[in-house]
Amino acid sequence: SDGVIATNHEDLQRLKHLPNAALIPIGSNILQPLPADFDPRMWRQRAGAGAGDFLLAFFGLVNRSKGLDLALEALARLRADGCSVRLVIIGGETGSSDPTNTAYQQEIRQQIERLDLPEYIHTTGFVDETTVAQYLTASDAVVLPFRDGASYRRGSLMAALQYGCAVVTTQPGVAIPAFVDGDNMLLVPPDAAALTDAVQRLYHSPALRSQLKIGAKHLAARFEWTQIARDTISLLERISGVPA
């Protein structure tokens, strides 16, 4: 090939020896604007959160790599520490691409019962893009504890950034300069104790939550589809030597 596009840093590391290898990310596949009558209080109530509750969101299919079990363990620890925290699982279905997801989902159900968490968790099942957007925006923070680390590969992370969420996720497996701990997300090791500590920081610091939301919106501009199109055109111009 005369050129190659990698959508993430992990693939670029394997392809960078090739001529004209470029990093051009994917954007969010959840793009619907919030409705004009969006009321976060209504969506928090649907998730079971009252005025004094801290609402966490987890978004995506149930898959072991996404670390939902770590989020549940953190939720149990936070509640044991006296934090009034609840969790909305947006989606929470198994999909059809990985047959092991069904067994993992059963483990998740058993874990929820074992940790006495049923009354503190709301699972939406499959919902449309507008509903996803409203649950994400109404939440106080989004937890995405990927076992293999945060990455441009993760569409759920792209969606959380798209809506300017305060994100807690796991340290990338490779260096990603755009992900800045404490500025546009909190980055932690993939374990429940570290995740708990990070959520506690957000629970006690509205200022930190505000900073992460601002940083997320700034970072999201990197993943706008119009910018992706411009970057793709630039690569094609460089390869062909012909301006578009």
Image (cartoon, helix red, strand yellow):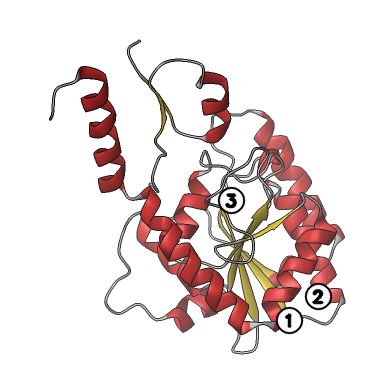
Q: Which image quarter: residue 82?
A: bottom right
Is residue 49 in view?
no
* Res 84 label: 1
Q: Amino acid at mark 3?
A: Gly
Q: Position of residue 60 (x, y in %)?
A: 55, 49
Q: Secondary structure at mark 2?
A: helix
Q: Position of residue 169 (x, y in %)?
A: 65, 55
Q: CA distance from mark 2 to mark 1?
A: 6 Å
Q: CA distance from mark 3 to mark 2?
A: 22 Å
Q: Quadrant of the C terminus?
A: top left
3 vs 1, front mark: 1
Q: Amino acid at mark 2?
A: Arg
Q: CA distance from mark 3 to mark 1?
A: 22 Å
Quickly name the residue at label 2.
79
Is residue 77 in view?
yes
Q: Position of residue 243 (x, y in %)?
A: 13, 28
**Is label 2 in contact with label 1 (beta carbons under 8 Å)?**
yes
